[in-house]
Amino acid sequence: MRKISWLLVLTVALSLLAIGPAWSSDTIKVGVVGPRTGGAAATGKAFEEGIQLATDYVNAKGGVLNKKLEIVFEDTAGAPDKAASGFERLATRDKVVMVLGESHSSAALAEIEVANRLGIPFMVVEAWADPITAKNYRYVFRAGPSNSGVVNDTIAKWVAAEQFKKVAIVAENTDWGLGIAELTEKAMDKAGVPYLTVTTERKSQDHYMELTKLKAFDPDAVLAFVYGTGLHYFVAQAGEVGLTPKAIILDGAGPPSLWPDFWPNVGEYGDLECFVSSMHEKVELTELATQFRKSYVEAFGKAPTDYKSRSMFDAILIAADAINRAGSVDAEKLVEALEKTDLTVTRGKVTFGTEKGGPEYHHWMPPMLVIQWQNKEQVVLFPAEGATGKLKR
Amino acid sequence: MFAIASMNGIVIGVIYALSALGVSLVVGIMNVVNFAHGEFYILAGYFSYLFATALGMNLLAAMTLAVAIVFVFGLLVEYTLIRPTYGDDLYSLILTFILSIVLQNAYLLIFGPYPNKPPGWVRGATDIFGLFMYGNQRLAALVAGTCVIVFVFAMIKLTWFGRIIRATSQDRGMAELNGVNTTRLNMLSFGLGCALAAAAGVILAPVFPVTPTAGVPVALTAFVVVVLGGMGSLRGCIVGGLTLGLVENLGAAYLSTGYKHVFGFIILILVLAIRPSGLFGHKEA
């Protein structure tokens, strides 16, 4: 009798194991990497929101290859070691067909090595360092801003348009911060604008020494490449030491200036702060952007603020489109399909560069805006064709 | 530059000393390294934020209640987690490390990833002798931090409870022979250590908003201060905190702002190389 019981248990267990892959075969898995913990966990939250809306959208339209799209989210905490091992887990344990995401350049630079080694298509969403695509890896794409794109297409042109005489550059000591600061220095050299560069530690809470150096330089604008909570500290302390409002701060990353706790943390010192963003509370570039906003409000009961939720939404749509066009989950066919992408998402029409030699390879650069907080209202300053107001000092 | 670097060094130094006092007290009496120290700091910051904003409580009442709750929570942690590990320092170290990870994730789940800041006590900045502008909230934190430090020293030096603490940290066996209930003292000391972390948290949260993982650098700096000053030495905490604050700020002013925290570690290595027991530590017999 006891033997029979054990046999029954064994049979049930084996049946369940056999059914497992059948369940999973009803879905096609795509991996997402990003920080759900650590100093930039807010980005993970934005990614989660984008994932929810995009999977609902894709699956409502028939899914991918007549199967449901399933997203597996791996936390990287913004740390390169965790990022590399997380990516490897997605590829080997979860058997994802493609990986999307990331918002820390240092983490993305570790992940692209794994993607290239394992031959898994990887679409970087919000990690800006140029080398990510400048390495020209076959399996690595980027559907989001790059340092050179943001500096040359937006920041340098905005500095010229506003006719700033002297600028200060503040960079956190990360791949993103140091990389974008170096590109900004080159752009300022080219434009003949004098500048002072100061580096700061990524996890630093106290910026008084950096701000004192900047104040002595007396710049018209401060180009701040500091991400996360650090940006809040920086803006608040810049007001305390009297650097602002004489100098205008530009948050060179964007989302921290839109986080729900920006105003409680920076108080009145947040007024007149500028930030780079691919999303404005009222300006929408495509019909899908309007649809995204509507779905977002319905799902979360609030208006979207962190534009990284929309970046992730777009990335999933691009991936789903590529899988459907490839007609297969084979990595080589997916790369070929991605290279031929011609899809309109919330931020415009996506096409990836195919010419090797620079960071433009496998890269689509979305349009970016410079926005200023004026009495807690977002006013678009740049580009001129999208401007809703003028810089206030 | 020297004036503001020195001023900021002193303010940050007092903040460091305040954050480290609780660690030093617990190490001195119980020989327990509390890895979750930073998370108690953050918990008080969150409570003061919640009480002052969501419940609309008076700021002082919100801060006092936050410290009191963390004190009670500290007593519970000692009773349930630390007490069964007495006799094996490694177990308590591992347990508090696990507790810190659990608390970080709980904060993320409950409060979300965004920074939270309780209302400031004062607004604006003050012109210091026409040399530089300095945030009023920082000046208020300096005064409040100094008051807490003076209170702790007065309690240790002048009260009967302080005498028991000093006696136990000097010779636990002799204190027991003289009737000190060291088990209860351990509980109270651990609670007091947590309350000191909480006091630092409520004082500093209006300056540096709290996030789920913001306690990690707080605890790390506190450990550096404690080792620099000498394990278990409260006086060493003050000197260690001020030394670290001044070195970091003068280093940032004259060398590089990109390696501010490296200067502190260099000083730590130098001090330990010359005096392994720290500035005010005693060599073990």
Image (spheres, coloured by chain):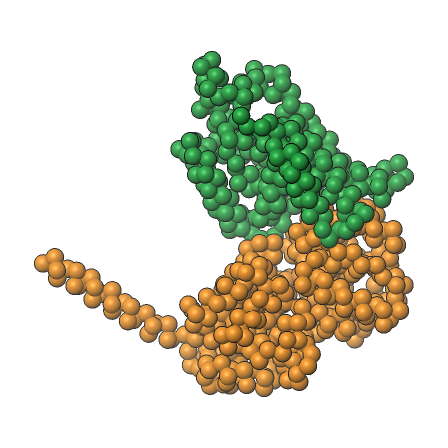
Chain colours: A orange, B green
Residue B229 point in image, percent of width and height: 65, 32
Q: Nearer the viewer, residue A387 or A41?
A: A41
Q: Which of A256 and A363 is in front in this view?
A: A363
Displayed quadrant of residue A287: bottom right
From this viewpoint, which residue is outermost toward the left? A1
**Residue A285 visible, this angle:** no
Q: In this view, does A45 lie above or below A212?
A: below
Q: Residue at x 62, y 63 (%)?
A: A106
Q: Is residue A98 above or below residue A36?
A: below
Q: In this view, does B126 lie above or below A76?
A: above
Q: Is residue B254 left or right of residue B202?
A: right
Q: Residue at x 84, y 59 (%)?
A: A196
Residue B178 point in image, percent of width and height: 47, 13
Q: In this view, does B54 lie to the left or right of B238?
A: left
Q: Is residue A388 left or right of residue A19?
A: right
Q: Residue at x 54, y 31 (%)?
A: B27
Q: Quadrant of the C terminus of chain A?
A: bottom right
Residue A390 point in image, percent of width and height: 83, 65
Residue A249 point in image, percent of width and height: 79, 58
Q: Is residue A334 left or right of residue A209?
A: left
Q: Which residue is drawn at 45% across and 17% down?
A: B176
Q: Quadrant of the N terminus of chain A?
A: bottom left
**Residue A129 visible, this angle:** yes
Displayed quadrant of residue B194: top right
Numbered marks: total: 0
